[in-house]
Amino acid sequence: MSNQLTVTSAAPHPASRTSKIARVDAVPLSIPFKPGNKSAPAAWGGKDLATADSLLVRVTTSDGLEGWGEAFGFEAVSSAKLAIEELLAPLCIGRDALQIVPLMCDIQEKLHIFGRSGPLMFAISALDIALWDIAGKCANTPVYKLLGGGVADLPCYASLEKFAQPSLVREAVRSALDAGFQSVKLHETELPVIGAAREEAGQDVEIMVDVNCAWTVNQAKAIAEKLEAFRLKWLEEPVSPPENFDGLAKVRATHRVPIAAGENVSTLMDFERLMSAEAVDFVQPSAAKMGGITEMRNVFPLAAMHNVTVMPHTFYDGPGLLAAIHVLAALGSTDSMIEWRYFDLEATIYGGALDPERGRIPVPQAPGLGIDPDPDVIAAYSTSR
């Protein structure tokens, strides 16, 4: 971790005011899809995806401030919740909520024996995001201004489920375009399905394809050659395992399809290895996976040194999404976009307060992350009731 910035310098508070961490609560949510969801079971480990499961973290300070964070969810929810309750909370209670970097350094040093990725890092990410939310609220300013300022809104793309059928992917692409998006990401691996999406979208719409580490290096090279005809903006994580940066670089060097990766990279050192290998055109740090805002912000100068564009991974719709929006608003380039998870759920964490319009998403202007989770949604869909 970098230790060059403490939030206290960016968000001063009166000496008489204390902001000690008093509580750390894990809040698991399970929000069902609306009836008729048509995603392919094979996309989710061979089973139907009936709900979108996420894990929020609420940090409460001794002076009554609340900050919200988010860990990457789905099947990692229970493990990340355990990490928060058993490992993180005991290290945090009583610490200064505004001394974020020293606290994060201390936590990562004490807990590195349990690993530097996966549910533990997801939990650390949620805690960090919540503390930045508190810092902004304490300073009465949005987080993006703590990071140096920024823009009022950002371009975003629709990130679809996997459908695995040409007719269904056509329907989903048309829905996204009708909603105002001009960039669409597929989670498909079969050429006929990708071809159907391109036909439906036409040639002027940006199409990206995320295959979630589906192929060996040789398989990826062979398929990338066929994908050139679809004029993809990028092919995401074509190689398994995701840490095979040299293999990824070979795929990138062989064909003209731009490569994106990074959501499964957890440390700044590994981001440096990924980009030094010349493996990617677009790097995808995930605030809810790699250590929160504190760590994510450090990827931007590193990417600039390697002439790589940052495209955050935000396949979630809670504080992790807001964290990426604030960081991108302050540090992103004009080519960067936010990923909008285009799911048809019964409810969303912010109750529609963050919905994009015409392919752009607002940067919240209220203090902290700018929006708190909708309490009615928490009450209705929390599984810890």
Image: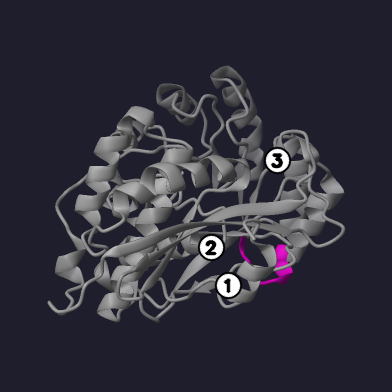
Question: Seen in the image, is 43 located left or right of residue 81?
Answer: right
Identify residue type, mark 1. Answer: Tyr
Kindly identify the residue that appears in the image at 53 percent across and 35 percent down. Answer: 237
**Residue 261 picture location, percent across and down:** 47, 39
Label 2 vs label 3, nearer the camera: 2
Viewer-nearest residue: 256 or 358: 358
Q: Could you give the CA–CA distance between mark 2 and mark 1, rounded to whole angstroms?
A: 7 Å
Q: Could you give the CA–CA distance between mark 2 and mark 3, rounded to whole angstroms?
A: 25 Å
Residue 350, numbered circle: 1
Identify residue type, mark 3. Answer: Glu
Picture quarter containing residue 117?
A: top left
Q: Quadrant of the C terminus?
A: bottom right
Can the viewer see residue 253? Answer: yes
Residue 318, numbered circle: 2
Identify residue type, mark 2. Answer: Gly
202 in magenta: no
Which residue bears the numbered disc 3? 188
